[in-house]
Structures are given as C-alpha cells and as structure tokens.
Image: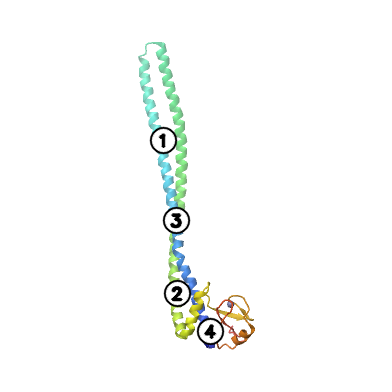
Amino acid sequence: MPKITEEQIVTLVKLQKIDIEAQKLESFLKGIPDRIEILDERLGKFVHEVEDDEKVIVELNKKYRTYESDVQMNLGKIQKSHVKLRSVKTNKEYQSSLKEIEDIKLKNSKIEDEMLEYLEQIERAEKDLNQRKQSYAKIVDDTTLEKDSIKQETEQCKQKLAQLESDRNAVTDTLDSQILDIFYRVKAKQPDAVAISEVKNSVCQGCNLNIPPQMFIELQHRNSLKNCPSCARIIYWEDQNKRPE
Ligand SMILES: [Zn+2]
C-alpha cells in the first residue's frame, strides 16, 4: 500500500475539484456548435417561410393579371359583336348576337367577382408577409445578440480553462508521480471520472457503501493510500473537528 501524507490527500482533493470544474467547462464548450446550429436553423426556417409567402403573392398576382386580360379580351369580343349587330339581316341573327353579347357580359362579371376575391387574397397575403418580415427582423436581432453572448461565454470559458490548466500544473508539480499515476488510473475507470471520495461514518461518498471497520480505523490515520473495496475510488477521511469552515 503506497504511503500518502495528509498534505498529499488534500492536494488530490484539490486536483479532483480542478478536473471536475474543467470537465464542466469542456462539455459546455462542446455544446456550443449545437447551440449555434439551432439558432441558424431557426433563422433559415424563417427565410424559407418569407420566400414561400412571396411566391404565393407572385402566383396570386399572376392569376389576377390572367383574369384581367380575359376581361379585356371579352370586352373586345363585345365590341365586335356590337359592330356585327349593325349589319345583321334577320331578327333571328339579331337575337343571337344580342345573346352572344349578354353571355360574354355575364362571363366578365363572373371573372370580375373572382378578381375581387383575388384582390382580397393578395391583400391578406401581403399583410401576413409584412408581419412575418417584422418577426424575421426581430429574430435576426435576437440571433445576433445570442451569438454575441455565446461568443463572450466561450471566451470566458476558455480563460477559466486556461486558469484551471495552470492551477492543475501547480498542483500536480507538488504530487509524487506514483500517487498521480494511481489517481489517473482510478479516474479512467470511473464512469463519472471521480477518482477520490471522502468516507463519512464508514460510508464511501462515491458509492454510498460501507467500508470494512478495520479499514475505516486505518483510514483515520491518514497515512496510507486506500481504495474503496466496492467502487475502487481512492478514499480519505476528514476529521470533522479539524475541517476548516
Ligand atoms: Zn466506494
């Protein structure tokens, strides 16, 4: 069983704290590309919606203009029929020309009704588009703000990590390499990467299981490196009366 001093135990606990903090920051940094992707997707979705709205309006206007030219064409037909009316010879021909004119007029009036409906649809679609464009402008602003804040958070996070890195070097420099090896070997085997656990009232705080009474007595001497028999973490005992508040 390797020897360990009280000071080394305190240093290992310190190292553990630095590692945990660094892991948190690293996983925070790892999540940043996803956060940016979500923001970009939201923006992209809005761009598509605006484009779709614009397409709908273009289509509606196209149909409206088709109707408009139909009406013009029909007006031309009516004019021709009026000319024809002047040269008809029989009453039957006269009646049939009149009927022709009436039919075309009826057709035009139907088309004009539809045109009115199209105008209303265009108006509604333009209103929707305006609203969407306003929301879009807000989302562009929000996205810019959020990206700025992500950038700041990233910077702060990187600075903290650099600080932790130098803290870690300062701590590991004071540690015996054999103890450091054991610490990192134990850490690599733990799913939560926690290598050292306090034992309180005979209970390992890493796995919540009791350690054997003899081991607990030895642990309280604080002079040899021990591992929890259940979870294999390095264990230590802290004198509650001496614990600094
Ligand atoms: Zn344990």
Q: Quadrant of ligand 1?
A: bottom right
Q: CA distance from mark 3 to mark 4?
A: 48 Å
- Look at label 3 and name its amino acid: Glu
Who comes first in sequence, dot 3 or dot 4? 4
Q: Is residue 59 above or below residue 96?
A: below
- Which residue is labeled 3 in the image? 41
Q: Quadrant of residue 226?
A: bottom right
**Comparing labels 3 and 4, the label whose residue is closer to the camera:** 4
Judged from the image, the secondary structure of the residue bearing numbered disc 3 is: helix
Report whether residue 203 is seen. Answer: yes
- Look at label 1 and name its amino acid: Tyr
- Look at label 4 and name its amino acid: Val
Check contact, mark 2 vs mark 3: CB within 8 A.
no
Q: Is residue 74 above or below residue 3?
A: above
**Comparing labels 2 and 1, the label whose residue is closer to the camera:** 2
Residue 26 x, y percent position in the rendering:
46, 70
Q: Please identify the quadrant where the N terminus is shown.
A: bottom right
Residue at horizontal 41 percent and vertical 43 percent from the top: 55
- Which residue is labeled 2 in the image? 161
Q: Is residue 48 above or below residue 190?
A: above
Check contact, mark 2 vs mark 1: CB within 8 A.
no
* Residue in the foreground of this view, choosing between 196 and 239: 196
Judged from the image, the secondary structure of the residue bearing numbered disc 4 is: helix
- Which residue is labeled 1 in the image? 64
